[in-house]
Amino acid sequence: GQQVMQIPQYQHVQEGEDFTTYCNSSTTLSNIQWYKQRPGGHPVFLIQLVKSGEVKKQKRLTFQFGEAKKNSSLHITATQTTDVGTYFCAGPKSGGSNYKLTFGKGTLLTVNP
Amino acid sequence: GAGVSQSPSNKVTEKGKDVELRCDPISGHTALYWYRQSLGQGLEFLIYFQGNSAPDKSGLPSDRFSAERTGGSVSTLTIQRTQQEDSAVYLCASSLSSDGRGAFFGQGTRLTVV
């Protein structure tokens, strides 16, 4: 079945440093979605990318969707303590009639002030 | 409702008892997911409902777990003869398949089996 893998599993940075998490799917995705889960909270949708090679920015966050639509990355510039949380990617398999989202296991980001 | 509602928010049960967890998705959302999340871990897929299609039950860990979605809306996840390893947060999410706004998660039910 479809698998979505994220690396790294954990990342600890000093405030102000950059952070990147990578997402790789075993199958081509119709789109890629990113979610953030704060400690003690539930996952919250951040963004969706649809097009091959697409890049989107949200303030200090930059999201990329690979040319083959099988991988994606989230880059945070100059991390802040408010960035702490687990970042998940998710995507539905391309070409299927079933829109089931498959989630990666997430990357836990901690930021030292 | 305005968001995905789950009840109860917390449930403590004795080993061997059955529990029912409820999810009320956003009105009109055709897709509904159940996930399980153990402390500090990722999302473990359990079951997926899409419209009137047969549910994808491939993530259910054992035959003690079952779920229903009545009338395409409210869903109930039932765990029979609970075990201590069932202790986790059970998250429900709903979505429209193609509106670009992703899936909306409920606050979860924290299940503790003692």
Image: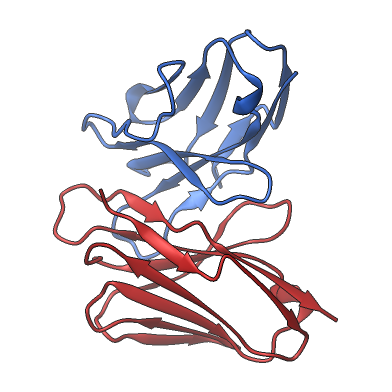
Write down the quadrant of residue B71 in the picture: top left
In percent of width and height, residue B2 lies at: 56, 47
Does A103 sit left or right of B107 as displayed? Answer: left
Q: Is residue A4 visible?
A: yes
Q: Is residue B76 above or below residue A89?
A: above
Q: Nearer the viewer, residue A73 or B50?
A: A73
Does B55 sit left or right of A57 as displayed? Answer: left
Does B110 sit left or right of B49 as displayed? Answer: right
In percent of width and height, residue A49 lies at: 35, 75
In percent of width and height, residue A57 lies at: 49, 87
At 21% from the left edge and 47% from the top edge, which residue is drawn? A98
Give the quadrant of the C terminus of chain A: bottom right
At 46% from the left edge and 66% from the top edge, which residue is drawn? A6
Chain B appears what colour?
A: blue
Tell me the red chain. A
At 67% from the left edge and 51% from the top edge, which residue is drawn? B40
Write down the quadrant of residue A77 in the picture: bottom right
